[in-house]
Amino acid sequence: MSLRSRIAAPEPAGGHSQESLLVAAYRTKLLEEIDLAEMSALAAADRRARLERVLGHIISREGPVLSSAERSQLIRRVVDEALGLGILEPLLEDASISEIMVNGADQVFVERGGRIEKLPLRFSSDDQLMQTIERIVSTVNRRVDEANPMVDARLPSGERVNVIIPPLSLTGPILTIRRFPRSYTLAELIGLGSLDEQMMLLVAALVRAKFNVIVSGATGTGKTTLLNALSATIPDGERIVTIEDSAELQLQQHHVITLESRPANVEGKGEITIRDLVRNSLRMRPDRIIVGEVRGGETLDMLQAMSTGHDGSLATVHANSAEDALMRLQTLSSMSEVEIPFGAIKDQINSAVDVIVQLTRHADGSRRITEIAVVDSYGHEEYRIVSVCRFLAEPMTPDGRVHGRFAYYPLPRAVAERLYMKGESVPAGFGVAHTDEQLATRGSAALRLPAGRHAPPAGQLQGPVPPPTTY
């Protein structure tokens, strides 16, 4: 969109507030005063400063009489409408906001600290909201209209944007902007209460020892944040290929290849899927493959890569528990055009997946690792999951906070031996199980115990444990 069209874009008719009319009037005056050719040659920051200065002169010359705060607010609003995203500009500059959700012209919600709140902001009409949406998608050479009513894109500044408009949306244009936080280290996540030191030592050892790790959780639980932190423990000399729908990972290693899928163009051609990228990555001699999220037929290709020489790969999946994660991987794998019996897919999962790290967002907005589980099943066996760590939550306190402690359980001997062979040690809090009776095993398969024996309760399965960490 040209500079003139951005500034001169008309305000929608009908339902104007006094402020909206004032903004429209001064935007017109601003257009009459500036030299568009000169403005186009300026950098974005200089262009904004020049517009603010010119508009300040216009207000001083023509009125109205305003307080300093009102004057600053009017200047900011006019320039935001001219060059930026209007009422969304201050929200994008607020580092405490992780998600902006616009449900039609009348409702603007944000997420802060894991909690959603409604703001006293509104667009003057659906038309003005559509102008803002079109300005956003034009920066990534996309368009949104009745023929293309859905857009999912990543902005140059890193935010992920999703748009859906009528007739698919019955509540008007819907805009969701997800802002990704800076990358955190595992040590910093300890400070946030997401895990503790013993867990950090364990997951770092598992990644360095090239266990295949699946990070599981619902939307907004911090899967990408944890995946980024886990990837930081990969040794620097390895060749890493990352594959994502929208590039969010920020790896610090020197040998990283970042791949991003591409949607179809307006003619419906040119789409490059996650599956295409996973298949291509196998020809790039990767030491590790990291998939931001598996959600379709590419899951089968990912599992095959994990079980055929690409140990130490990582991926995320949407699921509410470790058991759900395995079942979801099985379902997603069956979505491939290759017809494979469920039994064969189960074999593939048992062979490929070593560890599941389950994340949960609690009612108070806090995000934690609520389970670290080892997949201890083979071949045609039913999935056998061994919990090595769980978060034991306590009832919510009167102030709305969720507290609890992390409990540790012994690692299967095979896992401990694999760590040992890779030069890693078992953290002191976990210990090693020498019999099946010592394992915190659950899942669809029963423990392989003698007839008449039953697995002891999980609370009795702790090995040598340091004082529990409480949050």
Image (cartoon, rainbow, N blue to C red):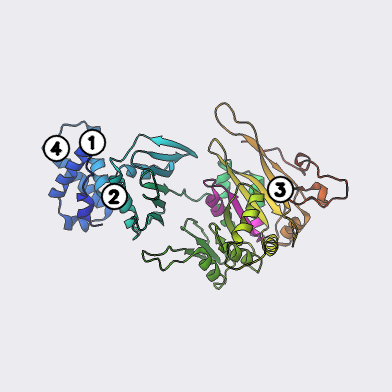
The numbered disc on residue 131 is: 2
Which of the two labelled residues, at mark 3 and mark 4, occupies the earlier sequence position?
Answer: 4
Q: Separation of disc 3 and disc 1 at Cα?
A: 59 Å
Describe the element under mark 1 as helix, strand or loop. Answer: helix
Left or right: residue 404 versus residue 147 is right
Q: Amino acid at mark 2?
A: Gln
Identify residue for label 4: 60
Q: Nearer the viewer, mark 3 or mark 2?
A: 2
Query: How would you rate the neighbour count of disc 2 (Cα within 10 Å): few for under 14, some for 14-19, many for 20 or more?
Result: some
Image quadrant assignment for residue 20: top left
Q: Amino acid at mark 1?
A: Glu
In the image, the segment drawn in magenta is: 205-228
Which of the two labelled residues, at mark 4 and mark 2, occupies the earlier sequence position?
Answer: 4
Query: How would you rate the neighbour count of disc 4 (Cα within 10 Å): few for under 14, some for 14-19, many for 20 or more?
Result: few
**Answer yes or no: do the residues labelled 3 and 1 have beta carbons within 8 Å?**
no
- Residue 311 in magenta stretch: no
Left or right: residue 451 versus residue 286 is right
| Image quadrant where one finds the N terminus | bottom left
Q: Separation of disc 1 and disc 2 at Cα?
A: 18 Å
Q: Nearer the viewer, mark 3 or mark 4?
A: 3
Q: Separation of disc 3 and disc 4 at Cα?
A: 69 Å
Q: Nearer the viewer, mark 1 or mark 2?
A: 2
The numbered disc on residue 19 is: 1
Describe the element under mark 2 as helix, strand or loop. Answer: helix
Which of the two labelled residues, at mark 3 and mark 1, occupies the earlier sequence position?
Answer: 1
Q: Nearer the viewer, mark 3 or mark 1?
A: 1
Q: How many marks?
A: 4
